[in-house]
Amino acid sequence: MIDRENKLPVTRQCKLLELSRSGIYYTPSPVSTRDIEIMREIDEIHLMHPFYGSRKIRNDLWLRGYDVGRDRVRRLMRRMGIEALYVKPRLSLSHPEHVKYPYLLRGLKITRANHVWATDITYIPMAKGFCYLVAIMDWSSRMVLAWRLSNTLDSSFCVDALEEAIATYGCPEIFNTDQGSQFTSEAFTDALLSGSISISMDGKGRWMDNVFIERLWKSVKYEDIYLKAYSSMMELKKGLTTYFTFYNERRWHQSFDKKTPAMVYFNTHPQRQVAA
C-alpha cells in the first residue's frame, strides 16, 4: 500500500491513506501459538457471555485450565477488538477527525428489503492465526448481502464489501453503522453518499442496534468456524462462501416462520413487488 520508491513522501502517503506513520516503520512481533490458543478461547467465552469483562473472562479461562492474568486477557481482548457488551463489542474504534452522522432509526418501522442495511466486523480464529470478517446485512430480512475477510483492520475490505452489495442488490435507503473508523472513513462514507444513501450512525449506548449481526456472528462461529478450524485464509474463504449460501438460502430463520432470509428479502423487495 505504501510505495517507498514513489516521489510522494511516505508521510504524505500515510496521511492520504489515513495510516499511522508509526505502523509503517514498526515491525510487529508475531502472535505466539499460546496467545492464539487463548484468543480462540476468549472469543468463545465472549460469544457465550457477551457481557463479561476481562476479569470474568480471566476467571473462565482459569476454569478451562489457562493460568493467565487479567492484564494479558485485556491485552488480547484489545488485539481482538472486543469489550463487554454494556460498552459494545467493537473491532472498530472511532477516529476523532472523521465526520459523524446522526442516528436515523429511532422509532422507524423496518419491514421491507433495502430499507435499512447494517454492517459490523468480527474476529475470526483459525487453526494457525486469525483474521477479521465484515458483513453487510439487510436489516428486515437478515440476509447477508456481501462479506470480506482481511488480516488487518483498515477500511478497504469494508469498502469492497459495500461496493459489492450495492452492485449486486442496488442501494438501500439508509445505511446504519457504529462510529468505528472503518465506517466513518471518507472512502466508506463517499461510497454511500454517491448512491444518495442516508447515513445513520449509532450513538453511545446504542449497541442493541447491531444485535442482528451479533446473532449472525454467533451462528457463523458455532455452526461453521469452530467446527471446521480452518487452516488458511483461502480455506476459510471457501468455507464461508458455502456457509453464507446455506445461511441465506437454506437455513430457516426462527423469526420468519420457517422462511429463509433470501425468501424474506426477495418477497419484500419493492421492485419485485411492483413487477408482480
Image (tube, rainbow, N blue to C red):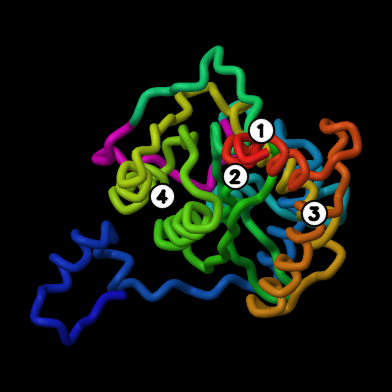
Spatial distance from mark 4 to mark 3, Cα to Cα?
A: 29 Å
Look at mark 1 in the image and give the residue it sits on.
140
Q: In the displayed structure, does residue 204 sit left or right of residue 61? A: left
Q: Nearer the viewer, residue 150 or 186?
A: 186
Label 2 and label 4: CA atoms lie apart by 15 Å
Task: Please give the residue where the numbered disc 3 appears in the rendered image.
Answer: 249
**Of the image marks 2 and 1, the number of the one nearer the N terminus:** 2
The secondary element bearing badge 3 is classed as helix
Amino acid type of the residue that numbered disc 1 sits on in the rendered structure: Ser
Which segment did they paint magenta? 88-100
Give the mark nearest the N terminus, 4 or 1.
1
Q: Earlier in the sequence, mark 1 or mark 3?
A: 1
Residue 95 highlighted magenta (yes or no): yes
Name the front one of labels 4 and 1: 1
Q: Label 2, on which residue? A: 82
Query: Which amino acid, mark 4?
Result: Gln
